[in-house]
Amino acid sequence: METKSLPERTLVAKAQAGNKDAFTELVRRHSGQVYGLSLNMLRHREDAEDNLQNVLVKAFHNIKRFEGNSRFSTWLVRITINEALMKLRKRSSERISDYHPANASEDEPRSFPEIEDSRQDPEREYISRDLTRKVFRGLNPSLQDTFILQKAEGWTNRELAEAQGITVSTVKSRVFRARVRLRQQLMALTQPGQVALQG
């Protein structure tokens, strides 16, 4: 039986058993989504391509850890987000080193690709991304994935429901709960006197 016609669960099991063709088919099915989300978060084509490669390498080495409690695509989305956030952190630390030329010796050439960010107020963008990373920390992974796919990727409630194997009303509930939780976290970060509500 050709791998293209196999259901995803079978492909995952085969890939976990070391079948490279099965993993290649999983990559074929999901690399577009991983690249799209990477581009949305990182804003640069080269960074998104880098992130796609990093995600696929990480997925290949860790596929035996995938327990099947969620869809394979959800697991990949989580890896994608984590890798992209790591890249953003690295990028922002390089940008900070640009403000202190004495510390920037060998890293200096790396600052050149960031010049194009000047049109978007890079400092404000960094603060915004850093805040986003902090408010997402501690958010339930299922809420996080649903919220990001809808708001950043533009997935419809119906598409999310089908992809995650849940109802449309559950999607709406998750997005609502994520929004409330993120608002609480944001208030706690921007108004230190306030205590984040636990939920």
Image (cartoon, grey):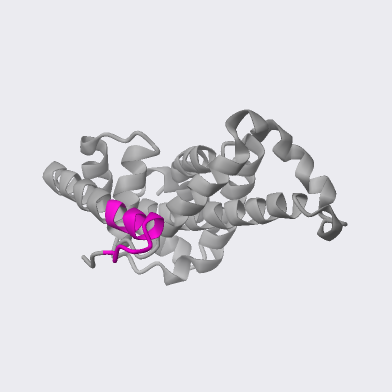
Q: Position of residue 57 (x, y in %)?
A: 59, 58
Q: Is residue 58 above or below residue 169?
A: below
Tag count in the figure?
A: 0
Q: Position of residue 26 (x, y in %)?
A: 45, 50
Q: Is residue 195 magenta?
A: yes
Q: Position of residue 111 (x, y in %)?
A: 77, 44
Q: Position of residue 149 (x, y in %)?
A: 35, 43
Q: Judge whether residue 35 can be spotted in this image.
A: yes
* Left/right of residue 174 with respect to residue 55 in the rendered view: left
* Left/right of residue 187 with respect to residue 57 in the rendered view: left
Q: Judge whether residue 22 can be spotted in this image.
A: no
Name the quadrant containing residue 135.
bottom left
Residue at the image point whose x is 53% and y is 48% from the top: 127
* Left/right of residue 46 with respect to residue 100 in the rendered view: left
Q: Is residue 157 above or below residue 166?
A: above
Q: 131 or 69, which lies in front?
A: 131
Name the quadrant containing residue 61.
bottom right
* Left/right of residue 157 with respect to residue 138 in the rendered view: left
Q: Is residue 153 magenta?
A: no
Q: For the C terminus, give its image quadrant.
A: bottom left
Q: 96 or 195, which lies in front?
A: 195
Residue at the image point whose x is 65% and y is 56% from the top: 90
Residue at the far top: name it.
119
Name the quadrant containing residue 191.
bottom left
- The span shown in magenta is 183-196
